[in-house]
Amino acid sequence: NAGVTQTPKFQVLKTGQSMTLQCAQDMNHEYMSWYRQDPGMGLRLIHYSVGAGITDQGEVPNGYNVSRSTTEDFPLRLLSAAPSQTSVYFCASSSSTGQGYSVYEQYFGPGTRLTVT
Amino acid sequence: AQKVTQAQTEISVVEKEDVTLDCVYETRDTTYYLFWYKQPPSGELVFLIRRNSFDEQNEISGRYSWNFQKSTSSFNFTITASQVVDSAVYFCALSEAWSGGSNYKLTFGKGTLLTVNP
């Protein structure tokens, strides 16, 4: 099991460029999510997905798009990069029993460090 | 809205000291989950513990222990006989569980940087 993988590990973009951060998991987890980590801010939820074809916004969704066509993959798209999007991005996944009121731990990828100049 | 407060931004101790990391949470839900994660200098996030709101028993795992008190909305983390390898940022997180099925939106505290000096 590779767990949660993210590519690339590092990326430098110029303002206005677009790119896609890749995330994949091989644990057959239903839930996947994207967080960004900024100094002194902890991790903040960008978007999440409860299954293939279903996505929703988190706390800081502006400037990002997601889609979930398969259980394994959950890419994050930056439409027009801005310096405020300089951050470390983490993808995470979690399983579900399918029963109510159960929330399981999330497994995180190694992160992508993005710099926008 | 849910909120997690880790009032200690940085803590520095000498090896073998005991140290407690505080976590206070706010939620309107009666069913929720609390988590602790460790982020060592290498940057990955490592899951440490998960606790649901119906289970107030304290937990011990080796040198780590957790004290969950609903009366004070706190979920504190204690490291006994700290070691240099414990140096990391520690995050407390909260997830509410909605009726009708599983749901999670993890809300993280801002983290506590623990430095254990030899």
Image: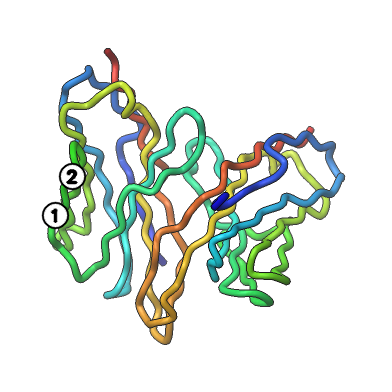
Q: In this view, does B114 lie to the left or right of A2?
A: left
What is the spatial separation of the Cα atoms under label 1 and label 2, in whole angstroms? 7 Å
- Taking depth in this image into account, of B26 and A8 the one nearest to the observer is A8
Q: Quadrant of residue A67?
A: bottom right
**Type of colouring:** rainbow
Mark 2 — residue? Answer: B65
Mark 2: amino acid = Ser
Q: Is residue A21 left or right of residue B60?
A: right
Against A78, residue B78 (above or below) is above
- Quarter of the image for the C terminus of chain B: give it: top left
Residue reaching furthest to the bottom: B100
Residue reaching furthest to the top: B118
Give the percent coordinates (x, y) of residue A7.
Answer: 70, 44
Give the percent coordinates (x, y) of residue B71.
Answer: 14, 62
Give the percent coordinates (x, y) of residue A54.
Answer: 64, 76
Against A60, residue B84 (above or below) is above
Mark 1: amino acid = Asn
- Taking depth in this image into account, of A86 and B55 the one nearest to the observer is B55
The residue depicted at 29 percent of the width and 74 percent of the height is: B31
- Taking depth in this image into account, of A62 and A115 the one nearest to the observer is A115
The residue depicted at 35 percent of the width and 27 percent of the height is: B87
Q: Quadrant of residue B19?
A: top left
Chain of the residue on which disc 2 is drawn: B
Q: Disc 1 vs disc 2: Cβ atoms closer than 8 Å?
A: yes
> Dot 2: what SS?
strand
Chain of the residue on which disc 1 is drawn: B
Mark 1 — residue? Answer: B58
- Quarter of the image for the N terminus of chain B: give it: bottom left
